[in-house]
Structure formats: C-alpha cells, structure tokens
Amino acid sequence: MPIALTVNAKPYTLDLPGEMPLLWVLRDEIGLTGTKFGCGIAQCGACTIHLDGQPTRACITPLAEAAGKHVTTVEALHSIPQGAAIQAAWAAHDVPQCGYCQAGQMMTATHLLRETPHPNDADIDSAMAGNFCRCGTYPRIRAAIHDAAAGHHAAKGDAS
C-alpha cells in the first residue's frame, strides 16, 4: 500500500515496504544524501531529521511511521530561521572537521533553538548529548549555538 508523506515541503507517495527505514527512503529512493548513516541503532545522531518538527533518528524510524507527516532534512534546514542561523554560525566557527556528523548536529541544534531560543551551556549539553562527533568539535558546536542564539552569525571573515 502506498505511503504518502511530505519531505522538505514536497509531497511524495511511495510504494515501498512500511518497515523500510526512513533513512534509506530519504537517501536511496528520494536522493537526499545529506542525512548520514552512522551506527544504525539510533545512538550517534548522524541520521537525525525532523519528523513533524521533532528530532528523529531516521535509521530506526520505519517509513510507515512517517505516513502523513512532514519530514525535514538538512537539505531544507535553511528554510527554518533557526536552521539558517545555525548553518551560518557553523560556517563562522569552522565547526566541521570531517563533517560526517554535522547534518545530525545541525538538525538537533536547530530544534534546540526552536524550543529554547537562548540556551545556556547545560541546555546545549543536554540537547546535544546524543550526537557524537569523532573529531571532537564540541567546543565549536557550543560556541556556534550560542552565537546563532544571540544573532551573531556573520559569514566567516565578516568584521561584524
């Protein structure tokens, strides 16, 4: 039975097994490869997307659970004001090293700012705790979130 959902504001009707992980639907069927496979057991955060606005691990979320819902991936993060601020702050702070975890990190940080517009360090640490970065860019992630929350997200090299 076809499953209808909306991904990045575009409607899709997919004739795929309902138990297929949403991650593979996004990457292999729709072609949105920004969401990454990390661990496959929802422990690392690399596959974090928003499902009806809530951070969700796409690697363990079956397609059937997304039926009738809105999925937002990193490819559309710029369309969310907090997401655009996070992306600009990420660039200004040179957050990524290898970059593999960054889509999930940014999706989680965007949700944090939507829920807590001016987070303190404890808020950030709590919200970001389930997203792992093997390169250890945590101090830059925290700084970027603080700057995005404060509106200090000028492009790299900008004197402001």
Image (cartoon, rainbow, N blue to C red):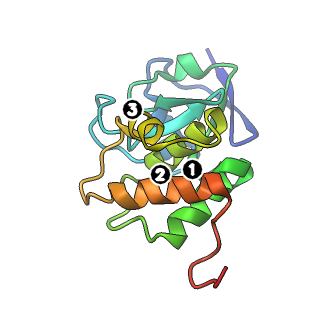
Q: Residue at x 31, y 39 (%)?
A: 44
Across and down, in percent, residue 73 comes to 58, 44
- Tell me the residue that label 1 is attached to: 74
In the image, 143 versus 60, the foreground residue is: 143
Q: Is residue 128 left or right of residue 65?
A: left
Residue 107 in picture, x, y percent from top left? 53, 44
Q: Earlier in the sequence, mark 2 or mark 1?
A: 1
Q: Secondary structure at mark 2?
A: helix
Question: Within 10 angstroms of label 3, few (less than 14), some, or many (20 or more) residues?
Answer: many
Q: Quadrant of the C terminus?
A: bottom right
Q: Nearer the viewer, residue 98 or 146?
A: 146
Q: Residues within 10 Å of mark 2 (few under 14, many from 20)?
A: many
Q: Nearer the viewer, residue 146 or 131?
A: 146
Residue 41 vertical placement versus 113 (above, below): above
List x then y, in percent, for residue 20: 44, 25
Location of the N terminus (image quadrant) = top right
- CA gap between label 2 and label 1 equals 6 Å
Mark 2 and mark 1 residues within 8 Å of each other at the beta carbon: yes
- Residue at image position (61%, 56%) is 148
Q: Which residue is mark 3?
A: 59
User: Can you say whether 154 is above or below 90 in the image?
Assistant: below
Q: Is residue 65 above or below residue 87?
A: above
Q: CA distance from mark 3 to mark 1?
A: 15 Å
The numbered mark, 3 or 2, whose residue comes first in the sequence reads 3
- Taking the spot 68% from the left edge, 59% from the top edge, the residue there is 151
Q: Is residue 123 left or right of residue 80?
A: left
Q: Residue at x 50, y 18 (%)?
A: 18
Q: Amino acid at mark 2?
A: Ala
Q: What residue did someone put label 2 on?
A: 103
Nearer to us: label 3 or label 1: 1
Percent x, y of residue 109: 52, 45
Q: Is residue 9 visible?
A: yes
